[in-house]
Every structure is written in structure tokens, then in C-alpha cells.
Image (cartoon, rainbow, N blue to C red):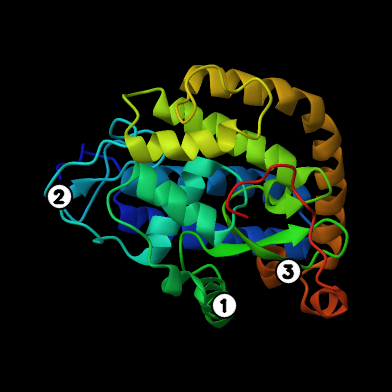
């Protein structure tokens, strides 16, 4: 793949990401919050540039275009295309990037199968988060991103069965009482918008139907078929009702997390609090595949 002069390569971006993360830790340790904020902003921009270079419109992996959040037409699978070329963690990252919210492995697998070539082997997802945590604790920030746990707003413990991406803002990785519903609606909007960019294939239509059947006003046609624009509008309308209350709860929990947790716990949850967790998990309203 040709690259314009002066545009950093993914390897160069990874090196810069590592340097910035070390600089952020030094700034936080020295109490220079202004410098830490500026470095975090540069870090987020560099991580986004890495995402764009590897997974975006111009990125190619294993000889095919990567289509996280907007490459090929929605659900457009090329017949005879090689399948399963991406590592599982990259497949999960693509699906989560498209969803834009914490999600359970089954939903992640359904989204990947609908919008991307190939499928994620369910057996490979069982130990993925543990492997990611082990990797982080062995060599912190060595990777551009980690697949980590969502954190419960009350205990700051890992939310059972929900995966997120380490580069997301902490508030986005926390789940409170309203979060399962707002995340469900957020994902519905994003999937509908992606599907609306092309002619949705049957797998995409089936996935959208599962979302639409749990959102008032999202079904406006034949059973089993969904107009992506109608789904997105209905999801946004309900999301407007819950978003601000959920945002305040998440922001409050994120503030506590930043003062109470270390770097690893901010990604994978507090082990001490996890031991005190009774296994409760916020129940979603009409969640799909959770």
C-alpha cells in the first residue's frame, strides 16, 4: 500500500503512542495536570490516527479493506473472499468500534458476522479479556489498544460479560443503571447508520430487526425488514430521554475511578471490589444478544 510522504506508518504511530503514554504517567506522577491533559489529547489523536491507518477506509489487512465504521457498503461480502485473516482481537475491535458501546461476546460475534467477512470463533472469546489483562500487566501500554472490561458504576468492578476498548473515554466504559439501555440505543443508531450507507444484506437486516423489535416506533414495514433511517430516528428519540441522566451517573463514577484505581484497574476493574460483587449486573431493557 502506497503512503503519502510525511504520513506516519502504523509502526511509527505505535512507537509514538508508547512514548505519549509514558509521558502522561510522568506528568500525572509529578502533579502537572495541565501537561497531562495536553498529552492525553495528543495521545487520543495519535490512537485515532493508528485506527484510521490500520482499520479505516484506507487501511488494508491481509489483502482486503478493513471496514470498521465505514469502509465497504454495509454487509457487502465479496464471494470467494478469503476469510478469517484478521486476529480475533482485531475482529473484536472492529465490531466494538462499529457498535460504539460495551457489548457481550454474542452480540460482538453477530455484528462481525453481519457487517464483516468471516466470523469470530466463540471459543476464542472466552479467555480474551483475561489474556488482554495478562498482557497489559506484563507490559503496560505496549499495544495500541486493549480489549478490556466494562466497569460497574457502583463497585468499579469488571461488569460480567461486557467488553470495551481501552482507548474509549472512561465514561464510555462504565455502566450504570441506565447504561445498558442507552448503550443498546447507541449501538442501534450506529448500526442503522452504517447499514444505511449501502444495500443491507440479509444478515444485516436480521440483526437490525432484533434491535428494531425492542425500540418503539422502529418497525414501520414488513415483519423481518427494517428501514435503517427509521430505526436510527426511533433510537435517537428514545436515547434523548435517557442520555443526560446516564451521562451524569457515568461521569460521577468515572471521577471516583480516577482517584481510586490504578492504571490496570481503570481498564480491567478493581479486583477487591470484584470479590465483593455479588454478581449483580444492570438489566437492560430489550437488550439483544446479552
**Badge 1 or badge 2: first in the primary sequence:** 2
Tell whether label 3 touches label 1 (CB within 8 Å): no
Q: Is residue 45 visible?
A: no
SS class of the residue under badge 2?
Answer: loop
Which residue is at the front of the view, 255 or 111? 111
Q: Earlier in the sequence, mark 1 or mark 3?
A: 1
Q: Earlier in the sequence, mark 2 or mark 3?
A: 2
Question: Which residue is the site of mark 1?
Answer: 130
- Give neighbour class at mark 1: few <14, some 14-19, many 20+ (Cα, 10 Å): some
Q: Residue at x 29, y 30 (%)?
A: 73
Q: Is residue 271 above or below residue 250?
A: below
Q: Do the residues bearing badges 1 and 2 touch, measured as CB atoms within 8 Å? A: no
Q: Quadrant of the C terminus?
A: bottom right
Q: Is residue 208 left or right of residue 163?
A: left
Q: Is 199 left or right of 153, judged from the image as shown?
A: left
Q: Residues within 10 Å of mark 2 (few under 14, many from 20)?
A: few
Q: Residue most toward the front?
A: 223
Q: Nearer the viewer, mark 1 or mark 2?
A: 2
Closer to the observer: label 2 or label 3? 2
Where is residue 280 drawn, in percent x and y?
83, 65
Q: Secondary structure at mark 3?
A: loop
| Label annotation for residue 269 | 3
Residue linked to disc 2 = 81
Amino acid at each position: 500500500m502506497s503512503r503519502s510522504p510525511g504520513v506516519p506508518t502504523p509502526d511509527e504511530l505505535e512507537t509514538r503512542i508508547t512514548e505519549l503514554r509514558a509521558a502522561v504517567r510522568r506528568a500525572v506522577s509529578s502533579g502537572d495536570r495541565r501537561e497531562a491533559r495536553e498529552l492525553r489529547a495528543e495521545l487520543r489523536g495519535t490512537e485515532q490516527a493508528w485506527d484510521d491507518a490500520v482499520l479505516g477506509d484506507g487501511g488494508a489487512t491481509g489483502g482486503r479493506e478493513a471496514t470498521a465504521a465505514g469502509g465497504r457498503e454495509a454487509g457487502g461480502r465479496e464471494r470467494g473472499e478469503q476469510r478469517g485473516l484478521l486476529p480475533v482481537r482485531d475482529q473484536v475491535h472492529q465490531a466494538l468500534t462499529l457498535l460504539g458501546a460495551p457489548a457481550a461476546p454474542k452480540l460482538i460475534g453477530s455484528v462481525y458476522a453481519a457487517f464483516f467477512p468471516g466470523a469470530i470463533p466463540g471459543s476464542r472469546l472466552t479467555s480474551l479479556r483475561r489474556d488482554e489483562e495478562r498482557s497489559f500487566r506484563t507490559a503496560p501500554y505496549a499495544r495500541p489498544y486493549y480489549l478490556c472490561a466494562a466497569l460497574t458504576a457502583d463497585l468499579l468492578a469488571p461488569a460480567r460479560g461486557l467488553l470495551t476498548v481501552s482507548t474509549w473515554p472512561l465514561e464510555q466504559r462504565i455502566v450504570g443503571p441506565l447504561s445498558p439501555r442507552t448503550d443498546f440505543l447507541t449501538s442501534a443508531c450506529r448500526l442503522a447508520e452504517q447499514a444505511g450507507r449501502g444495500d443491507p444484506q440479509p444478515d444485516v437486516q436480521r440483526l437490525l430487526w432484533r434491535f428494531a423489535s425492542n425500540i418503539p416506533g422502529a418497525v414501520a414495514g414488513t415483519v423481518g425488514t427494517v428501514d435503517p433511517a427509521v430505526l436510527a430516528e426511533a433510537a435517537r428519540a428514545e436515547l434523548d430521554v435517557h442520555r443526560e441522566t446516564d451521562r451524569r451517573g457515568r461521569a460521577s463514577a468515572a471521577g471516583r475511578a480516577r482517584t481510586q484505581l490504578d492504571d490496570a484497574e481503570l481498564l480491567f476493574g478493581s479486583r477487591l471490589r470484584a470479590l465483593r460483587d455479588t454478581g449483580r449486573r444492570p438489566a437492560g431493557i430489550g437488550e439483544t444478544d446479552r
